[in-house]
Image: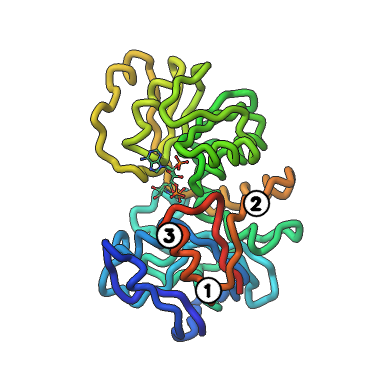
């Protein structure tokens, strides 16, 4: 079958190890399903994989891609949950120490077909296109868990989203607005700030700018560059939910004094469960809210999508179609 895969790693030139070509058809073991992929979306994770982060040399060649929507062997339209937990694990899959993401240990979704445990299939509503559904399993699921599970945000509360242009950040803005929250967002880029207003932010600010109000919660994926601003933006008793550190994990000032004196909560968040993905799909179906697609590209032209993501020239999700 046709597939987009990593053949080697390079930290300086990650795309040098990217190959578009033929790989063997997968064979589903007992309890697993074969999904014919209709659409798959690109994440920063795929660039990290080409750099050799989260992927071992002996796992190569590895088909990339965490996210997919497609059709199972019985003709059901499905969204694929990307977190593969150990068969012995029960409960919240994100707590399983043996879990992996598709394309880390098991072959990924940038292919004609992908196999996953049957439990990882979530029904796709007819109202949602395959391309829209393919955006959900990583960036959108991460945003959903950050806001509603880890952040415990309620309608009417105020949330700050840092780094508005990112895949997770655009999902955070859209979902928060649809759930009745007041949404503030920052970006370094004027055009991205304007786009953030279009997708649901009530107010936008330059990164690091003084805000007119203190917020109930901050959603962090930027890390080092925005951490201090995030802590300073919180009301007493507020919470910061962090799922990524795009600008780096090392801090000059962790703002520890403010954290204890204002009794702030710092909460980590990683991906989401199969049931949260099901909840996200139903939430979008009920509200009519949809992921923002930056562009749709045939899988056979996937390299142009990787180039766009590497250069940072993206607002919303890049989707590869069958
Ligand atoms: N824990 C999880 O389960 C999980 C899941 C998905 C992603 N992640 C992580 O979350 C992070 C975001 O992922 P993504 O796919 O949304 O990435 P992305 O699309 O590349 O977005 C990153 C955003 O960070 C902002 N940024 C980067 N450097 C900055 C700097 N120096 N100063 C201020 N802002 C900066 C940019 O915002 P502006 O250009 O708008 O300023 C950019 O749009 C990544 O680190 C990723 O690994 C974690």
Residue 46 in percent (x, y) is at 41, 62
Which residue is disc 1 drawn over?
A: 301
Which residue is located at x 51 percent, y 39 percent? Answer: 164
Q: Residues within 10 Å of mark 3 (few under 14, many from 20)?
A: many
Q: Earlier in the sequence, mark 2 or mark 3?
A: 3
Q: State the SS at label 1.
A: helix
* Chosen colour scheme: rainbow
Q: Locate residue 40 relative to residue 50 in the image: left or right.
A: right
Task: Report if the beta carbon of the residue with label 1 is closer than 8 angstroms to ligand 1.
Answer: no
Which residue is disc 3 drawn over?
A: 85
Q: Locate residue 319 relative to residue 19 in the image: left or right.
A: right
Residue 220 in percent (x, y) is at 43, 36
Which residue is located at x 62 percent, y 29 percent? Answer: 202
Q: Residues within 10 Å of mark 2 (few under 14, many from 20)?
A: many
Q: Earlier in the sequence, mark 3 or mark 1?
A: 3
- Which quadrant contains ligand 1? top left
Q: Nearer the viewer, mark 1 or mark 2?
A: 1
Residue in the foreground of this view, choosing between 78 and 216:
216
Which residue is located at x 45 percent, y 79 percent? Answer: 20
Task: Report if the beta carbon of the residue with label 3 is closer than 8 angstroms to ligand 1.
Answer: no
Task: Report if the beta carbon of the residue with label 2 is closer than 8 angstroms to ligand 1.
Answer: no
Which residue is disc 2 drawn over?
A: 281
Marks 2/3: CA–CA distance: 21 Å
Residue 61, picture quadrant: bottom left
Marks 1/2: CA–CA distance: 28 Å
Q: Nearer the viewer, mark 3 or mark 1?
A: 1
Residue 175 in percent (x, y) is at 61, 40
Q: Is residue 237 above or below residue 113?
A: above
In the picture, the quarter occupied by the C terminus is bottom right
Q: Are marks 1 and 2 in contact (CB under 8 Å)?
A: no
């Amino acid at each position: 079958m046709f597939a987009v895969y990593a053949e080697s790693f390079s930290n300086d030139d990650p795309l040098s190890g990217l190959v578009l070509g033929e790989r063997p058809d997968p064979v589903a073991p007992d309890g697993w399903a074969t999904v014919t992929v209709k659409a798959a979306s690109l994440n920063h994770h795929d660039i990290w994989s080409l750099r050799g982060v989260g992927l071992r040399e002996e796992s190569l060649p590895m088909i990339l891609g965490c996210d997919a929507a497609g059709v199972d062997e019985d003709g059901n339209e499905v969204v694929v949950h990307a977190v593969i937990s150990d068969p012995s694990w029960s409960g919240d899959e994100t707590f399983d120490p043996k879990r992996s993401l598709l394309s880390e240990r098991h072959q990924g979704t940038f292919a004609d077909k992908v196999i996953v445990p049957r439990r990882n299939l979530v029904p796709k509503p007819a109202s949602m296109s395959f391309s829209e559904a393919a955006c959900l399993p990583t960036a959108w699921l991460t945003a959903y868990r950050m806001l509603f599970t880890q952040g415990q945000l309620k309608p009417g509360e105020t949330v700050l989203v840092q780094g508005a242009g990112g895949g997770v950040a655009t999902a955070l803005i859209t979902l928060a607005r649809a759930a009745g929250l007041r949404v503030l967002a920052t970006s370094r880029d004027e055009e991205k700030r304007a786009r953030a207003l279009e997708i649901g932010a009530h107010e936008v600010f330059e990164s690091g700018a003084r805000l007119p109000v203190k917020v109930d919660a901050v959603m962090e994926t930027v890390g080092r560059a925005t951490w201090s601003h995030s802590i300073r933006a919180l009301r007493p008793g507020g919470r910061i939910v962090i799922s990524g550190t795009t600008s780096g994990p090392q801090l000059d000032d962790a703002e520890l004094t403010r954290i204890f004196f204002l009794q702030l909560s710092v909460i980590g968040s990683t991906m989401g469960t199969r049931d949260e993905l099901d909840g996200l799909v139903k939430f979008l179906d009920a509200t009519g809210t949809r992921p923002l697609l930056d562009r749709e590209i045939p899988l056979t032209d996937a390299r142009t999508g990787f180039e766009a993501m590497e250069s940072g020239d993206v607002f919303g999700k890049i989707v590869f179609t069958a």
